[in-house]
Image (cartoon, grey):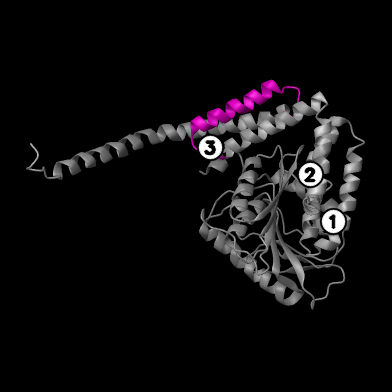
């Protein structure tokens, strides 16, 4: 059984149902023509949502979206974030029903269907071959992460409520496009999601491979998506339309509005709002001026004792988190556990100390598993070491002595 299965990362039908309820709610906001496509390998029909005013002679960016476990092909979540225009959204189904399977054979089956559907969307409905994106929540997020690593035709992807389960080639690097564009990836994860650390593993891996990765953390959520949608995802999708210069005015307007609204909040709430704002795609687009403005305001807020403590707790938690992500053995995990416990004790009156209980629980469970594995490996390591020493002794016996040396 895989480590992620031990850690309780089985996808929940209840949570998929909850997301489906959100999708029904979101679908009432955006109305587009939807076509259904029969694919022999799938139990359910693929859903294709066309943009308003669709012209098959034009070329549109395409998102291929995979729902969570138990979910049907759905376009509403992504369409809610793209708006009614500009995008083709495809709701995909699975060949492999049940739990996530990223074995080579399973991936080959999923990718065969992906290419069949993609070919139809490009040929018949005007999909842009250079702007195809994979996306998914939960089970769909795990698959999207795998597809990004293995499918070179993807311009990027959206990983929600999931992360890296398997690394297919540790030495692989993403090739740059003809315009030297990097693969663009958006990751959205709840702070209390059981897949939280796996999202960070995905972030680090894709960045190392050369992708441009945006991470949005939903502070108060578990394994779900914000009921009102993700502001970061909406911005990220707008930026994929290659109208960056035209977007700067909108980005300035939205960022100024969010900054102004945060100024009306109590200090601690304002700090959280500004911390989230600083990591949005629009702020990254606007550059150093806005980054400095937000940073300056956060520095001012730290004069408040509660804000200062919360900020310091967050910094130390992030430091401990990256230690956890790079652990090699039980000794490393023991150190991480002590770091988390120290944060909880020292900053007991902070929000970070409350949420860190899940981090401690996760590391303790992982520590038990790793310690057990190390104990199981000790006899094997001793046997390997013993055989190596015997070989070295035999090699020394076969070396002829020098008769000139007495």
Residue 27, disc: 1
Residue 379 horizontal side relative to residue 266, left or right: left
Where residue 11 sits: x, y (%)?
65, 45
At mark 3, the secondary structure is loop
Residue 320 horizontal side relative to residue 328, left or right: right
Q: Quadrant of residue 9?
A: top right
Which residue lies at the image location 85% right of the left edge and 54% below the top edge?
A: 251
| Disc 2 from disc 3: Cα separation | 29 Å
Answer with mark 1 or mark 3, whichever residue precedes in sequence: 1
| Residue at the disc numbered 2 | 278
Where residue 361 sits: x, y (%)?
62, 30
Residue 327, disc: 3
Looking at the image, residue 127 lies above or below residue 74: below
Query: Does 368 lie within the magenta span?
Result: no
Answer with mark 2 or mark 3, whichever residue precedes in sequence: 2
Q: Which-is-in-front pick, marks 1 and 2?
A: 2
Q: Which residues are magenta?
A: 326-352
Where residue 307 sits: x, y (%)?
80, 28
- In the image shown, does 254 or 87 lie closer to the viewer? 254
Q: Quadrant of residue 14?
A: top right
Query: Does 329 lie within the magenta span?
Result: yes
């Amino acid at each position: 059984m895989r480590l992620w299965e031990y850690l309780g990362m089985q996808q929940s039908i209840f949570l998929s149902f909850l997301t489906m309820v959100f999708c029904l709610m979101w679908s009432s906001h955006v109305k587009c023509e939807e076509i259904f496509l029969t694919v022999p390998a799938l139990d359910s029909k693929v859903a294709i949502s066309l943009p308003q005013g669709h012209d098959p002679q034009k070329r549109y960016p395409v998102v291929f979206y995979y729902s969570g476990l138990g979910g049907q092909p759905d376009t509403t979540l992504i369409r809610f974030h793209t708006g009614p225009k500009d995008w083709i959204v495809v709701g995909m189904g699975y060949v492999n029903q049940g739990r996530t399977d990223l074995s080579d054979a399973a991936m080959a089956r999923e990718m065969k269907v992906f290419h069949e559907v993609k070919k139809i969307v490009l040929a018949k409905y005007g999909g842009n071959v250079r702007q195809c994106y994979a996306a998914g929540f939960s089970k769909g997020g795990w698959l999207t992460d795998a597809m990004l690593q293995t499918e070179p035709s993807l311009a990027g992807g959206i990983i929600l409520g999931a992360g890296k389960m398997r690394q297919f080639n540790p030495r692989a690097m993403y090739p740059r496009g003809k315009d030297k564009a990097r693969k663009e990836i958006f990751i959205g994860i709840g702070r209390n999601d059981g897949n939280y650390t796996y999202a960070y593993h995905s972030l680090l891996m894709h960045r190392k491979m050369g992708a441009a990765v945006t991470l949005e953390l939903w502070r108060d959520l578990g394994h779900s998506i914000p009921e009102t949608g993700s502001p970061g995802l909406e911005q990220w999708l707008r930026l994929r339309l290659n109208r960056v210069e035209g977007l700067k005015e909108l980005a300035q307007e939205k960022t100024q509005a969010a900054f102004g609204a945060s100024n009306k909040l109590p200090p601690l709430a304002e700090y959280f709002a500004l911390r989230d704002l600083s990591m949005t795609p629009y702020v990254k687009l606007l550059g150093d001026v806005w980054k400095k403005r937000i940073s300056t305001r956060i520095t001012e807020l730290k004069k408040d004792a509660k804000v200062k403590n919360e900020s310091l707790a967050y910094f130390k938690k992030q430091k401990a988190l990256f230690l956890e992500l790079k652990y090699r053995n039980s000794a490393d995990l023991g150190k991480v556990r002590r770091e988390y416990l120290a944060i909880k004790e020292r900053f007991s009156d902070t929000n970070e100390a409350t949420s860190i209980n899940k981090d401690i629980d996760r590391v303790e469970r992982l520590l038990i598993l790793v310690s057990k594995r190390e104990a199981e490996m000790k006899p094997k390591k001793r046997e390997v070491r013993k055989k190596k020493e015997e070989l070295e002794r035999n090699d020394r016996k076969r070396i002829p002595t020098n008769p000139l040396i007495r």
